[in-house]
Structures are given as C-alpha cells and as structure tokens.
Amino acid sequence: MNYKILGKDLKVSAVGLGCMGFSHAYGAPTEINEAIRTIRSAYAMGYNFFDTAECYVGTCADGTLSFNEELVGRALKDVRGDVVIATKFGVKHEGRHLLTDSRPEVIRRSVEGSLKRLKTDHIDLYYQHRIDPNVSAEEVASVMADLIKEGKITHWGISEANEEYLRRANAVCPVTAIQNRYSMMYRSYERLFPVLEELKVGFVAFSPLANGVLSAAYNSYSKFEDKGDYRADMPQFQPQAYEQNTDLFAMLKSLAERYSATPAQISLAWMMNKKPYIVPIPGSSKETRIRENGGAAEIKLTKEEVALIDDALDRVKMSEVFGGHK
Ligand SMILES: NC(=O)c1ccc[n+]([C@@H]2O[C@H](COP(=O)([O-])OP(=O)(O)OC[C@H]3O[C@@H](n4cnc5c(N)ncnc54)[C@H](OP(=O)(O)O)[C@@H]3O)[C@@H](O)[C@H]2O)c1
C-alpha cells in the first residue's frame, strides 16, 4: 500500500475502506464479529483510512440494529493512533430518502454520538454528509472551526460538494477533502478539479466501482433479493444494463489483461493515477476483494494512458448508473 496526503496534512492509504456495506444498503448486515475481523485484516494489509457515517445503520436478521460507527470503533480501537477515521453528520434516512439537517445544535449532538459509538476522543475527518439548504456554508464551517479548536475533530470535509459551497465554507475553515460520487460511469465532478487544485482540497471518491458493477463480476443472473439491498433498484444492475454495458466490460477486461490486473483494479487505478489527490474508498465485506482493491495502488499508469482511457470512456456506450448519468 502507498499513502497520499489529503488537504494539507492528512496522510491516508491510497485506497481507503468504505465500511457502509457492513451495515447498510447491501442487504442484511454482516455478522458483527466477522465485520470486525474483516476491518482488522484491511488494517493489516496497510489500509489506514476507514469511512463510516452516523446514518449507516442496518437491521440484522434478529431485529437488532447494526450501527456502522460502533463496529468501526470496535475493530480499530487497539490501533486507533495509526488510523484515520472519517465519519459524517447531517443526514437521516427516512426509508431510502435522505433528510438533511445541519443546524449547529444538531451537529453538536451528532459529534458527541459519533465519538461515543467510535470509542474515540476525536474524529480525523468529519464530513457534512449533504448540503443543507436551510443552513449556510459559513454557519456549518464555523461550527467545524469550533470543533477543531475543541479537539473533537481534526479535519473536515463536505460530501456531494459543489464549487460555490466549497469556496464559501473553505473561506471560513479550510476544508481537507470533499467526498463525492466518482467512477468510470459517473465523471461529472471532474469539473471540480481546478477548484480542488486551487484550494488544495482532496477528492475522496465514493462508489468508485459504481456499486460493484465496474468489477465486471456481476451479470444478468446476479440477484439482490434482500429488501435492504439497494442494488435491486439501481439502473446499472437491471438486466438490460448488462447488455448496454457490454462494450464497457470488454474494455475493462482488455485493460485488465494488458496490465495483469482485474477490472476492479483498473477502475480504481485509473482514478488514482489521474490526480494525486484522488482517494477511492471502495466498499467490500470480503477480505479477498479488499486485498484486490488495495492492490490497485500498485498499478502505475502514465498521463497518456489515463487520457486514452478517458477518451475511450467518452465514447463507449454505457447504461445509466445510480446517482446520475455519464
Ligand atoms: N458520501 C456519501 O454520500 C456516500 C454514498 C455512498 C457510499 N459512500 C461511502 O463509499 C463507500 C463505497 O461506496 P459503495 O459501497 O456505495 O460503492 P462501491 O465501493 O462502488 O461498490 C461496493 C460494492 O462493490 C462490491 N465490490 C467491491 N470490490 C469488489 C471487487 N473487487 N470485485 C467485485 N465486487 C466488488 C461490494 O460487494 P462485496 O461486499 O460483496 O464485496 C459492494 O457490493 C461506502 O462503503 C461508503 O463508506 C458514501
């Protein structure tokens, strides 16, 4: 594993681990001891960057709740000083809808809850999960400045940030990273690259495998039957999408062969080699895939090779993808 710097000084593994799927959105939560073992193996592989959120909660088969922050905290408590824990505030799930609330008093309550569940005295990277249209960027950023002064958080970020909000927030309290959706199937935030470079803000890419489909490991026979598995309704996992993505999968497989890698590794290496400040956080509940994804950090692509892939992505036919379009 190699490491990158987000913002001015946050040292993170070049690939982070998205922990959401252990509890939320990918079917029944993983059994807690297995989830803890898997997170610890990721640490042993060199991962030091772990992503969770206050709102990642799932219901287990026996009706108990799986609080993602709790299992991340338990898994990492013995190595707390060596890892970067990122969590998020400002969103509640109502069914599959997100309700935003970043009022200062709500943030204050959230940070205390997260610290408790994570069993830590500080959060390394605290993201506003979604912009709240009722609270200004300046107001949120000034709460972040206070939390930094108090030592409760050390860095902060914004998820699904746009340029105007980022500039306003950053002027009050420097932002370390944004966390936005980014993958070969969803590239619209490339328009933020110039502003990220100007402000020296990192880009943490969520859903970097387009929820797994860019691993080319799924096909029209793949079934997601658990009612808590959001993939069942995602456009890229519908039967016709596999047909529409035939050329994209062929392209990934041929690149994988050329670089002695896997399609998932190519998908991640493409973005990591594009900009030094892009850090993907693929999610997986399986040790073998976590190892595979971490291995993407070893793949070196030149600027020209990345540009050729971009060009091919511009032209290749692809299906719709959850969260937006190509
Ligand atoms: N800020 C936000 O609003 C936001 C939104 C969504 C996600 N996130 C964060 O970003 C992280 C990652 O995003 P994501 O989980 O939505 O999407 P993702 O990382 O693109 O895809 C995750 C899915 O891909 C599968 N997968 C991973 N590696 C694989 C491989 N090498 N081969 C085959 N399948 C593979 C996983 O299945 P298995 O578990 O079966 O391996 C899982 O179902 C989350 O865990 C969360 O921390 C943030």
Image (cartoon, rainbow, N blue to C red):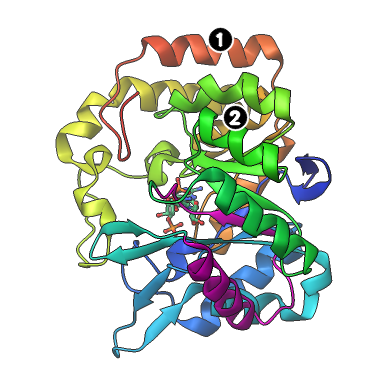
In the rendering, which numbered label is found on residue 271? 2
Check the image and report above or below for 15 versus 56: above
Q: Is residue 56 magenta?
A: no
**Figure quadrant of residue 112:** bottom right
* Residue 266 located left or right of residue 134: right
Which amino acid type is shown beneath numbered disc 1? Leu
The mark closer to the camera, 1 or 2, is 2
Which of disc 2 and disc 1 is earlier in sequence? Answer: 2
* Residue 232 located left or right of residue 45: left
Q: Regarding mark 2 in the picture, which secondary structure is present there?
A: helix
In front: 58, or 122? 122
Q: In the image, residue 308 lies at what x, y percent? A: 56, 9
In front: 249, or 236? 236
Q: CA distance from mark 1 to mark 2?
A: 13 Å
Residue at image x 49%, y 46%?
136
Residue corresponding to mark 1: 308
Q: In the image, residue 231 lies at what x, y percent? A: 27, 52
* Residue 216 located left or right of residue 224: right
Residue stretch rendered in magenta on the structure: 103-132
> Can you say which quadrant of the picture contains the C terminus?
top left
Residue at image x 21%, y 53%?
232
Q: Residues within 10 Å of mark 2 (few under 14, many from 20)?
A: many
Check the image and report above or below for 114 versus 13: below
Residue, far left: 240
Q: Are marks 1 and 2 in contact (CB under 8 Å)?
A: no
Q: In the image, residue 70 lies at what x, y percent? A: 55, 80
